[in-house]
């Protein structure tokens, strides 16, 4: 693809709803990161390729998103870390989140993966109610 046909970073997110959780599809991680930086939004990235269980995924998220040491490592705590402390920290510019290589393993099956993504959908709804963009993109292993 010719570089001139790639959208400008600030235009990349323009065609994406402001509060959504969706497959990364044709987006490239580096382009999403640049778009977040160009528009002044937080960029959160987690590579989950080595997760085999819910606990593994939460551990990786906690480390890669720099969650506090007291992070409870359950879905409620994940939602709380994606919303409440950030909201209390003051005005937020928006979020671009990438969950790279979500696993499909015996202990992290389709149902568990959907529950995991539901935390991010709930966070997108939370920020949407506050008129703050929260776009989450995911890919599968």
Image: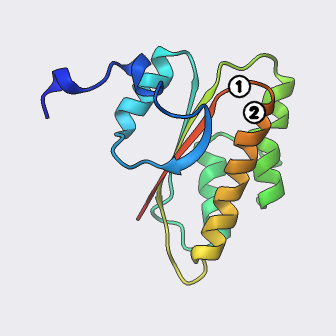
**In the rendered image, the vertical position of residue 115 relative to residue 71, given as above or below:** below
Q: Is residue 103 visible?
A: yes
- Label 2 crowd bin: few (<14), some (14–19), many (20+), radius 10 Å: many
Give the SS element for disc 2: helix
Q: Residue at x 58, y 75 (%)?
A: 110
CA gap between label 2 and label 1 equals 5 Å
Residue named by callout 2: 127
User: Residue placed farthest to the bottom in the image?
Assistant: 106
Q: Quadrant of residue 4?
A: top left
Q: Position of residue 61 (x, y in %)?
A: 62, 51
Give the SS element for disc 1: loop
Q: Quadrant of residue 131?
A: top right
Q: Is residue 68 visible?
A: no
Q: Position of residue 31 (x, y in %)?
A: 36, 30
Q: Which mark is residue 92?
A: none
Out of 81 and 50, give the one closest to the viewer. Answer: 81
Q: Answer yes or no: do the residues labelled 2 and 1 have beta carbons within 8 Å? A: yes
Q: Quadrant of residue 59?
A: bottom right
Q: Residue at x 62, y 47 (%)?
A: 63
Q: Residue at x 39, y 39 (%)?
A: 29
**In the rendered image, the vertical position of residue 53 relative to residue 35, given as above or below:** below
Residue named by callout 1: 132
Q: Position of residue 84 (x, y in %)?
A: 85, 36
Q: Quadrant of the N terminus?
A: top left
């Amino acid at each position: 693809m010719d570089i001139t046909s790639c959208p400008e970073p600030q235009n990349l997110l323009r065609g994406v709803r402001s509060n959504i959780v969706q497959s990364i599809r044709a987006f490239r991680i580096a382009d999403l990161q640049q778009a977040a930086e160009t528009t002044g939004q937080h960029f959160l990235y987690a590579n989950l390729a080595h997760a085999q269980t819910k606990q593994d995924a939460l551990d990786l998220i906690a480390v890669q998103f720099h969650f506090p040491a007291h992070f409870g490592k359950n879905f409620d705590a994940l939602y709380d870390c994606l919303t409440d402390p950030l909201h209390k920290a003051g005005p937020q510019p928006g979020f671009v989140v990438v969950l790279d290589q979500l696993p499909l393993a015996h202990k992290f099956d389709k149902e568990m993966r959907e529950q995991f993504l539901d935390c991010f959908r709930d966070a997108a709804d939370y920020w949407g109610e506050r008129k703050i963009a929260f776009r989450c993109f995911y890919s599968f292993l």
